[in-house]
């Protein structure tokens, strides 16, 4: 009999985390996965012989260290290798290097602008203040400001107090930061185009906004608030690709007795008398449980697998209005050797970092204009990496694997569905962009997997291919994520919960939504909590 | 002993209002302005022989009703037209008419009509909450004092009174863009873009820019506080400037026109007066600037007189505008396809669907000229024959989006742009160019020179949330007092900001009296 205590829909990293904490509390849990493999967007796949692609998410930093420790992910095989550096190549043949070593980095900025070099420490200190403010709230359930429940009032008060402790001016600066554009924020510190452009990229990745759209400074913060082994803001590669994270989570889950069922495509959540009682698959199989947790994005959760008649009308409307916009694409490329970039010694460690080609905010803003007009960027912003330089298991000896994240790609091309010709055009624009800076790149390509929002949606099930499962704008953050009134992981249907990146604290391979949702479920079940609390930075 | 209790820099509407309230409280006040007429952006100018026009602000819709009655502006000569309808011109001449809280024409169906009424209702309720904030000084959040606590309490109560659903809506909408909100509420493209236009007027933002719902709410709140609707000032906007000057004088304020303030002077740590362009010095207990923050801090005070961090904040204050104006002198009444003369006297707008609006914005980000524009048109001479010779007419229009400083320079760009704009109007008003006696284009950079508004931005700073409310103009210089002892702000660069509200001037005067700064 397919009877469980809880069913989690979707074996992405949040679904597995949620399942792990429920199983750890002694529940009989099944995680159902549509694909024949687990991981969702956190996968490594061998799509060309001997080359492993992290074919969606590609770097790790946000994964909450509380969870890594608590679920003993290293014991289950997870190893995150930090990488340093990166570069932005410029049209004039020069480049701007992002060195891990502070002194070397200072000298590199000073090579472009002495004034900017002197502003850099001020910038780092101010940005790090913001990360320290937000980090303690990642593993917390957002309070509901419209509620009068003691718990909400207490949490709101605590939240308000931690902000008030900043003092009037710093508090206003913080509000400014949360609402400003990344372009304006960087203009407060720097004057040199390439330096601003290098940093601004983190403000637009995965976001349907431009560098001058208010709200993008927060997106920048979202990319800075993680850490690798306590080194805040650092990024790393999961050894073996991002799939290693899902693998480790699944082993932790199974160590608590959890069960993963692949090729299980959920059709509907079954609701009886206003209560969730299980799910039905497309093939007719039914699984029963009094707790059903959806790790699908809010649109799919409420508009696809829930019957609208089981929902209040305002929730259907809120789900329809939820902003989840396709804005990015990806190329995964198997290379016959290491490409050479103009002006950079191939032995330079910068090569192992993230490489970019947009050397001004204007080029990035124009790339956004193309997206607004419904086409892919003709001069795209690329976040390119060669992980095989850091993790040799990704490609055969002497060969390399390249991951190219592309901003922007529209969910539809001028209002029409993507065609194969569109996909070719998109691929060409990216390869041309790289070739402009690397003479031997084109000849090294052995295999190229191109993913537009169409492919990402079809394979991973992210609506419109939005990597964050919903735009990271303030109207969809904290107590507004996914929508006001439903930010505490509970759906309007009793027994049905949400645990995806579409809930607080949002997208990226963070696993916090899955853990936070588990805590709320256990609370409703009046079971002891198994989820670790957040900790404060120094 | 100082010459005056207070010197107000600039005789714009807020400067005059502030001076009038202070003078009514028996303080000795001097207002100084380099222009020869009072009113600042509320001014009338003869732009061609016998043709006059409101040469900056063109509609009056937001002037606070308390200011109007306190200063007895009606007795001082201010007379307003009836409220105007907004008519969005359509290529097929089936125009969209927005009046009296409802919409008609252009095939708007019942569903959209109901949605429009619901939307107006919701926005009015939000405006009602914001009203609490607009009528007083913006509260400090950390510093504890009873005035600000009371404001916050009232605000909190106002939010609660909205009910859970509307409160959630407001929390969600406050920071997002008008583009999404329009798509959530309406189907009709012209209805969406007609409303979206009100969210971007006088700014550098497109409908997709986050924060545009806030700028729309700002406009609605102002309209809520005034209660007049969109009106035309009879005799031109200058009449408002004159009425305010008369009222200030009647209360005992002195007004010195035609000689500009050259600098704000400090003695020791405190502002002690001003130096005028003619070299004379005037002393006062405090100086109140109604100039925009950039002019105040950068030009008049000078960054060397400020703490470096404050100077940096002043320097980073954003005030670019993408709005220009055209003034046309016409030998006869123009004819717009599908409009009666009565309709022609209303507020006419030309605005493409929102995606096209957004495209029209793109070029100005790169200092380029756009190939299509948005218009907000007035033919004031239909109701007010004093502005043009008998039987002849004036057409004036706000035009979005026009760059502040195009790459090729205005000398080269001006002629072709003016010609293009007249051509764009002629699509809706055939034969317009054959009626032309004179025409002029006033660019954002012209506004900077003629009206001393930095960036050509008559809101005295972009209306985005990070420069609004308790953050206007910037942290450390809020609540009308600045980081510099003895220097106060009373212009649109102070809370509640842009447009012709009159509230910054009134709130500043009250705050200055409350603080005992003149004692």
Image (cartoon, coloured by chain):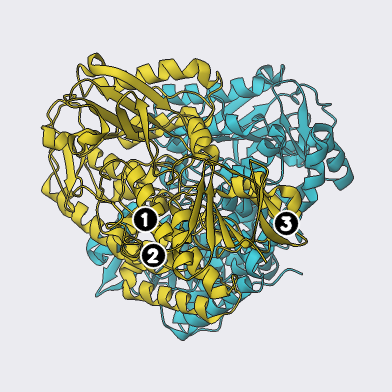
Chain colours: A cyan, B yellow
Q: Earlier in the sequence, mark 2 or mark 1?
A: 2
Q: Nearer the viewer, residue B422 or A315?
A: B422
**Which residue has dot 1 on it?**
B217
Q: Report which quarter residue B88 is drawn in.
A: top left
Foreground mark, 2 or 3? Answer: 3
Q: Position of residue A334 (x, y in %)?
A: 65, 29
Q: For the residue carrying disc 1, how many other residues have a C-alpha within 10 Å: few (<14), some (14-19), or many (20+)?
A: many
Residue A462 can be seen in this image: yes
Q: Which element carries disc 1, helix, strand or loop?
A: helix
Which quadrant: the N terminus of chain B? bottom right
Which quadrant: the C terminus of chain B? bottom right
Q: Nearer the viewer, residue B31 or A277?
A: B31
Do the residues under discs 2 and 1 have CB atoms within 8 angstroms? yes
Left or right, A81 with respect to B400, comes to right
Q: Earlier in the sequence, mark 2 or mark 3?
A: 2
Q: Report which quarter residue B109 is drawn in.
A: top left
Q: Which mark is residue B266?
A: 3
**Which residue has dot 2 on it?**
B130
Marks 3 and 1 sit apart, C-alpha to C-alpha, by 39 Å
Q: Which element carries disc 3, helix, strand or loop?
A: strand
Q: For the residue carrying disc 3, how many other residues have a C-alpha within 10 Å: few (<14), some (14-19), or many (20+)?
A: some
B69 to A204, vertically: above or below: below
Q: Position of residue A90 (x, y in %)?
A: 71, 25
Q: Nearer the viewer, residue B327 or A325?
A: B327
Residue A99 can be seen in this image: no
Q: Identify the residue at image location x=72%, y=56%.
A: B266
Q: Which element carries disc 2, helix, strand or loop?
A: helix
């Amino acid at each position: 009999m397919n009877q469980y205590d809880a069913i989690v829909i979707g074996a992405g990293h949040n679904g597995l985390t949620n399942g792990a904490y429920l199983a750890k509390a002694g529940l009989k849990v099944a995680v159902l996965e549509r694909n024949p493999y687990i991981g969702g967007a956190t996968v490594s796949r061998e799509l060309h012989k001997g080359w492993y692609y992290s074919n969606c998410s590609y770097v790790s930093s946000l994964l909450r260290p509380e969870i890594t420790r608590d679920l003993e992910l290293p014991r289950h095989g997870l190893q995150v290798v930090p990488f340093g550096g990166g570069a932005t190549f410029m049209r004039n043949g020069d480049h701007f290097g992002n060195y891990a070593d502070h002194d070397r980095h200072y000298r590199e900025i000073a090579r472009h602008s002495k004034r900017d070099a002197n502003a850099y420490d001020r910038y780092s200190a101010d940005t790090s203040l913001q990360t320290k403010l937000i980090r303690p709230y990642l593993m917390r359930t957002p309070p509901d400001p419209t509620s009068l429940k003691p718990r909400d009032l207490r949490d709101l008060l605590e939240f308000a107090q931690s902000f008030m402790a900043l003092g009037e001016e710093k508090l206003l600066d913080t509000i400014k930061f949360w609402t400003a554009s990344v372009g304006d924020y960087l203009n407060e510190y720097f004057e040199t185009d390439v330096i601003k452009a290098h940093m601004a990229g983190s403000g637009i990745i995965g976001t349907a906004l431009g560098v001058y759209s208010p709200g993008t400074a927060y997106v920048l913060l979202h990319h800075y608030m993680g850490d690798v082994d306590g080194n805040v803001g650092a990024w790393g590669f999961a050894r073996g690709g991002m799939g290693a994270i899902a693998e480790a989570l699944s082993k932790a889950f199974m160590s608590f007795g959890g069960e993963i069922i692949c090729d299980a495509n959920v059709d509907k959540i079954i609701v009886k008398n206003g209560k969730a009682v299980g799910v039905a698959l497309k093939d007719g199989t039914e699984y029963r449980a009094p707790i059903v947790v959806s790790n699908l994005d809010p649109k799919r959760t409420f508009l696809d697998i829930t019957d609208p008649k089981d929902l209040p009308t305002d929730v259907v409307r809120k789900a329809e209005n939820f902003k989840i916009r396709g804005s990015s694409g990806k190329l995964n490329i198997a290379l016959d050797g290491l490409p050479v970039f103009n002006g950079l010694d191939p032995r330079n460690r910068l090569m192992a970092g993230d490489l970019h080609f947009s050397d001004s905010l204007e080029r990035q803003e124009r790339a956004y204009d193309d997206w607004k007009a419904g086409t892919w960027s003709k001069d795209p912003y690329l976040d390119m990496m060669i992980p095989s330089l850091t993790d040799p298991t990704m490609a055969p000896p002497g060969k390399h694997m390249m991951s190219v994240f592309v901003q922007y790609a529209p969910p539809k091309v001028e209002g029409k569905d993507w065609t194969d010709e569109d996909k070719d055009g998109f691929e060409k624009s990216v390869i041309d962009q790289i070739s402009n800076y690397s003479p031997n790149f084109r000849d090294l390509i052995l295999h190229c997997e191109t993913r537009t929002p169409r492919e990402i949606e079809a394979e991973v099930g992210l609506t419109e291919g939005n990597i964050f499962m919903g735009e990271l704008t303030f109207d969809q953050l904290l107590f507004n994520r996914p929508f006001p009134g439903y930010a505490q992981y509970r759906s309007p249907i009793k027994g049905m919960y949400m645990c995806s990146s579409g809930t607080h604290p949002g997208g990226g391979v963070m696993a916090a939504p899955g853990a936070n949702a588990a805590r709320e479920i256990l609370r409703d079940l009046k079971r002891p909590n198994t989820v670790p609390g957040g900790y404060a930075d120094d | 002993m100082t010459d005056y209790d207070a010197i107000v820099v600039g005789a714009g509407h807020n400067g005059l209002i502030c001076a009038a309230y202070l003078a009514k409280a028996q303080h000795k006040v001097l207002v100084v302005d380099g222009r020869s007429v009072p009113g600042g952006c509320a001014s009338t100018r003869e732009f061609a022989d016998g043709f006059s026009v409101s040469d900056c602000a063109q509609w009056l819709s937001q002037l606070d009703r308390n200011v109007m009655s306190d200063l007895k502006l009606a007795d001082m000569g201010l007379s307003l037209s009836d409220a105007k309808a907004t008519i969005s011109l359509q290529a097929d001449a089936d125009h969209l008419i927005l009046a009296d809280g409802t919409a008609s024409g252009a095939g708007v169906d019942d569903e959209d009509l109901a949605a429009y009424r619901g939307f107006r209702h919701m926005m009015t309720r939000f405006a009602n909450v914001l009203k609490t904030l607009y009528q007083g000084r913006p509260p400090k959040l950390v510093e504890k004092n009873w005035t600000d606590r009371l404001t916050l309490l009232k605000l909190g109560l106002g939010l609660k009174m909205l009910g859970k659903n509307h409160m959630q809506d407001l929390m969600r909408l406050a920071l997002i863009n008008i583009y999404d909100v329009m798509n959530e509420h309406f189907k009709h493209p012209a209805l969406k873009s007609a409303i979206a236009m009100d969210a971007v007027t006088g700014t550098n933002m497109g409908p997709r820019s986050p924060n545009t719902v806030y700028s729309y709410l700002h406009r609605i709140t102002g309209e809520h506080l005034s209660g007049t609707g969109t009106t035309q000032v009879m005799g031109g906007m200058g009449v408002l400037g004159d009425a305010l000057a008369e009222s200030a004088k009647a209360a005992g304020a002195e007004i010195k026109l035609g000689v500009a303030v050259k600098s704000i002077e400090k003695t020791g740590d405190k502002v002690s007066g001003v130096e005028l362009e003619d070299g004379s010095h005037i002393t006062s207990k405090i100086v109140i600037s109604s100039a925009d923050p950039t002019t105040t801090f950068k030009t008049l005070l000078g960054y060397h007189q400020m703490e470096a961090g404050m100077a940096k904040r002043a320097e980073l204050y954003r005030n670019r505008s993408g709005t220009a104006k055209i003034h046309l002198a016409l030998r006869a009444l123009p004819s717009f396809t599908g409009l009666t003369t009565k309709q022609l006297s209303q507020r006419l707008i030309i605005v493409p669907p929102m995606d096209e609006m957004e495209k029209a914005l793109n070029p100005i980000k790169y200092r380029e000229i756009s190939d299509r524009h948005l218009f907000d048109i007035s033919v004031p001479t239909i109701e007010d024959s004093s502005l043009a010779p008998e039987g002849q007419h004036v057409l004036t229009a706000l035009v979005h989006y026009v760059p502040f400083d195009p790459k090729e320079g205005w000398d080269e760009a001006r002629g072709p742009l003016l010609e293009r704009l007249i051509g764009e109007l002629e699509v809706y008003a055939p034969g317009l160019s054959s009626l032309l006696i004179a025409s002029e284009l006033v660019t954002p950079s012209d506004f900077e020179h003629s009206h001393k508004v930095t960036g050509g931005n008559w809101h005295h700073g972009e209306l985005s949330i990070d420069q609004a409310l308790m953050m206007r103009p910037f942290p450390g210089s809020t609540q009308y007092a600045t980081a510099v002892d003895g220097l106060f702000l009373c212009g649109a660069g102070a809370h509640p900001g842009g447009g012709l509200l009159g509230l910054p001037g009134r709130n500043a005067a009250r705050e200055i009296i409350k603080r005992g700064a003149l004692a």
